[in-house]
Image (cartoon, coloured by chain):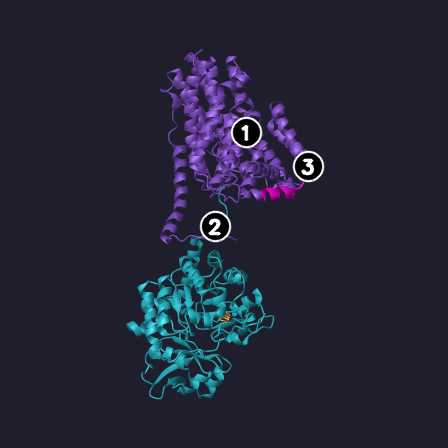
Chain colours: A purple, B cyan
Amino acid sequence: MSVEIDTRPLWLILSLKALRPAFFIALALLFWFLATMPTPEGLSIEGQRAIAVFAVCLILWVSNMVPLAITSLFAIVLVPLFGVLSKKDTYALFGNEAVFFILGAFMLAGAIMHSGLSNRIALNIMERFGDSPRKLLLSIFLLAAVLSFFMSEHAVAAMLFPIVFDISKGLNLRPGKSNYGKLLFFALAWGCVIGGVGTFLGGARVPLAIGILKETTGRTIEFLDYTVAVLPLVVIMLLVGYFLLTRFFPIDVEGVESAHQVLVKRLKGLGKMSYDEYAVGAVLGVTILGWIFLGKQAGLATVALVAVVVLFVLKLVRWKDIEEYVNWGIILMYGGAIILGTALDKSGAAAWMVNSALSGWATTPWTVFAVFSLLSIFLTEAMSNAAVIAILLPVSVGMADSLSMDPAIVTYSIAVPAGLAFMFPMSTPANAIAVSSHYISVKDMAKGGFIMCITAWVVFNLVAAFYWPLIGMGYTK
Amino acid sequence: MKKNYLNTPGALKIDLMLRGIRIDDPVVKAWACGSSGIDIMLPQNTPVNIPCSEEFTGSSPYIIKKKGSGYAITDGKGEVGVSLLERPAFYNKKTSTGVHFSNIGASHGSYTVITPSPRCDFFNRSIECKYCAGNFDIKGRDNTVYSVEEVIETVEAVLKEKSSGVIYFSIGFSDTDDGGIEFLKPYIKAVKKQFNCLVAVEALPPKENHWIEETYALGADSVLYNLEIFDKELFELICPGRAQLIGQKRYMEALAHAAKIFPNGTVASHLIVGLEPPGSTCQGIDFLTEMGVVPILPIYRPSKGRALRIEPLNTEIIIPVYKHLYGALKKKGISLNWVRDISMVTTPLEVRELVEGGGKTIAESFYNSKLGRKTAWGLSTLRRKLRVKDSKDEGH
Ligand code: SF4
């Protein structure tokens, strides 16, 4: 048992305790106000209520006044209760592929950790890069980014998580307190996020965007063209990300050398790789290949869950072994976020917000690009990136047509920023996984993520304005 | 006898504790039989435990005698009416396992000392405190450990009598980092779970401060790390175990930290009057009160073969020390309400009469009432609820 005694004056503690009920009363009043105020023109009553639920959940997610998963449960309850979606539709959305993908990823990560393979990999990385905290940090950052070029960033985050966690434990970093602990998990999350926009393979959003583009205009974007257009953004953001992180959280460990000898000893202590490690490693390797080559047809979740079943068939893990590794809170949170995103989409609330925010702004191709990319990058913080694309792309393609803009460019303006979710754990599973380590708080992520979002938006617009013309791309047709 | 203390209960208490009392009356003799002292209630509800069996009491000017239907104490020139404090009824009862409650608990006015184990490891190393077994009945090599159930039965019997509102756990030295708090943990938890009473813990300072926080979080409302002697050399001489294995410095650190954690006036430390020069005790008082700690000043009772008392020592010399204690506590704004109504020591509130005159205030009488005790318990529990941070993760 480890206890902490609050030695601040009692009146202060009492006042702070009173803040909590006051906060919830204020939140209830805000919800009531948003849900019952006269419905704005163009917005349905369901849309208005969806916005009210969204506002309440966003505040709860950011303030962390109740656990993230409980906020999601709250969203799941409020959406059907206020008639935004039917009960059946709401609960069915929980069966979304993304939820099962995360479940499978957690189980896989559990198996890797339980077999000791992640420990071995972590020890190897630490031993190899053990001479400098900077190199170790950079290696995790780049490893996450490069792997996300080839497979879903979600999967990379889930795969690297146990390794980074073991490294943090190996260095005795205190969750929530250690700057270096924060840096390692930010490197993991942001590496995945930045790398994830580098190719089509980083996530489902680019294929989805191109699908919509093709459906509405008949145009498409080639795999290589996309990567060539986006690569400078990825490189610049990696540099900016590393710079900002090391400024926000100055490295507070003397070196990883002190642990080096211990690491070598531990590595020796592990002995040869066991059958279980080889087998789990092989299943993981095949799963990665499955995600790369079969992900599109079979679905990422299917590949992940098949891998989990194989692990059990081969008796490499028992249910008891991996049960503790499954973060049910994150699964609930993500399910709730998907339901909320869908509620905003289906009720027309999201489209209404876009329309009301854009009228009077989007008058030139440059402003359309700037405004849509800004909207996309901020909306993706609060809702699933696929939902952002589903909401923004049809509106923007229509708008592009009226301004004689290239619809492919507009697609970029939404699909790329939709992947750059730096601010919140509910923005993308990579962030959620990093926050679940307890090394990073939601506040830490929101603060650093906000600056990264603005920077990414500026860099993206500069790349579009100055680099794209060099490779034959322009705003207009 | 230079002065007459019969009309000032605070001073009389000191004089009686210092000189003891002679007993002629056969009823009182039978009453006191087997006890370390006789428990008497002086005027103004001032309880006192007066030595009556030690050698030095033979020369005491005080005699207790029957007067009408009650009793009186006389010094030959005057007398004052007193009453005998009834021996707690639980002393004659046993636990369901056959242990005498009096082996586990001893009442001393408003509090009852509970000793779950009478062992102290200093005895096994022959570095015990030289005065030991004077104030508390702690034996050396006795390895008896009373079960939680036995202690709970005792506490239940104690609280039924309604005289004691504070359960005071006391343990000797054990060579652990926690100062014995891990050992006391199940007892404190069980008492706090079953009864609405205040709990004090008298232990030796733990090696690390987090144990002090745990002590508070567990349910202790008050803590005592008894320094006993402030003079460093005398401390080393008389308390070799405490000096060698803990050290005065650690006592000071632990007390200072406890004063930050526990409520005002609930962290205390004994300084035994009579084992060091009064000037040194006064220095100790200043040092402790500066940290927010209440010095408690028991008077050393010499027993056969343990002639440690400094000489000369009389009430005229001691009273200024108690007055100094009262002044120091007032100056530092330390609450006087916790250390009260104890028969074994003269409390600061009892000294107030000597400094300012006047008896108990309405607030003090309230604190002593059943409702007052319930209020004190309620406030103490609420304070703990507010202060102890929930370590359970509320985040994700
Ligand atoms: S610590 Fe000293 S006074 Fe207490 S029981 Fe041990 S020897 Fe006796």
Q: Is residue A302 above or below residue A116?
A: above
Chain letter of the residue carrying label 3: A
- Distance from label 3 to label 1 (Cα)? 25 Å
| Residue B280, percent from left and from top | 37, 71
Give the quadrant of the N terminus of chain B.
bottom left
- Distance from label 2 to label 1 (Cα)? 36 Å
Q: Are marks 3 and 1 on the same chain?
A: yes
Q: Nearer the viewer, residue A235 or B21?
A: A235
Residue tagged by mark 1?
A: A153
- Distance from label 2 to label 3 (Cα)? 38 Å
What's under tag 3, amino acid-wise? Phe
Q: Nearer the viewer, residue B95 or A86?
A: B95
Q: Residue at x 47, y 61 (%)?
A: B220
The part of the chain drawn in magenta is: A262-275
Asked whether disc 3 touches disc 1, contact meaning CB atoms under 8 Å apart, the reply is no
Q: Secondary structure at mark 2?
A: loop
Question: Where on the picture, by quarter, is residue B327?
Answer: bottom left
Task: Say which mark, if any, is on residue A312.
Answer: 3
Task: Say which mark, if any, is on residue B390.
Answer: 2
| Residue A125, percent from left and from top | 57, 36
Q: Secondary structure at mark 3?
A: helix
Q: Nearer the viewer, residue A319 or B232?
A: B232
What's under tag 2, amino acid-wise? Asp
- Asked if residue A270 lies in the magenta stretch, the reply is yes
Foreground tag (3 vs 1): 1
